[in-house]
Image: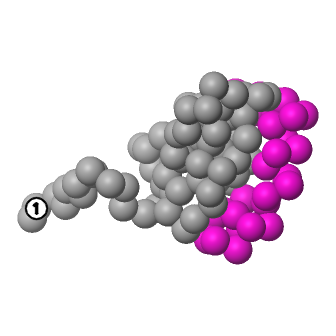
Amino acid sequence: MSRPAPKINPKVAARIRAREAEALAAGWAFGDLWESRFWHLVNRRNRPGLAALMRPGDKLGAITKDYIEIVHRSGAVNKFYHPDRDKPGEKRVVAGA
């Protein structure tokens, strides 16, 4: 039995909504933005959404086809990488290869 998704803080929702069209145009899916569960397993991989990673004081920086920047109140920047694209420093392992 899966748990219901937690409610998204209104400030986080407003930040995502303000840039949603830009992210969708860059190739992001609705679920990539709005999934609010941090542990969200899809095909045995964890796929949290942007909403699960943001806090009320965070802002969005650059939105590209590969990542979305989360700018924290402290000024620190984290990149939320697109789950279906290669990530820097990540090696794909193919079974049987």
Image vertical order of residue 96 relative to residue 39, above or below: below
View extreme (left): residue: 97
Q: Nearer the viewer, residue 76 or 46?
A: 76
Q: Residues within 10 Å of mark 1 (few under 14, many from 20)?
A: few
74 left or right of 17?
left
* Residue segment shown in magenta: 1-30
83 left or right of 86?
right
User: Where in the figure is residue 35, as x and y percent of width and height?
Assistant: 69, 44
User: Where in the figure is residue 27, as x and y percent of width and height?
Assistant: 62, 71
Residue in the image at 81% along x and 37% along y: 12
Report if residue 19 lies within the magenta region: yes
User: Is label 1 in a helix, a strand or a loop?
Assistant: loop
Image vertical order of residue 65 relative to residue 43, above or below: below
Report if residue 16 lies within the magenta region: yes
Q: Nearer the viewer, residue 96 or 39?
A: 39
Which quadrant would residue 70 be assigned to in this image?
top right
Figure coloring: one colour
View extreme (front): residue: 75
87 left or right of 71?
left
Q: Nearer the viewer, residue 39 or 89?
A: 89
Can residue 2 be seen here? no
View extreme (bottom): residue: 25
Residue in the image at 63% along x and 60% along y: 63
Can residue 65 be seen here? yes
Residue in the image at 48% along x and 40% along y: 46
Amino acid type of the residue that numbered disc 1 sits on in the rendered structure: Gly
Residue picked out by circle 1: 96
63 left or right of 66?
right
Image vertical order of residue 88 relative to residue 8, above or below: below
User: Where in the figure is residue 86, as x and y percent of width and height?
Assistant: 36, 61
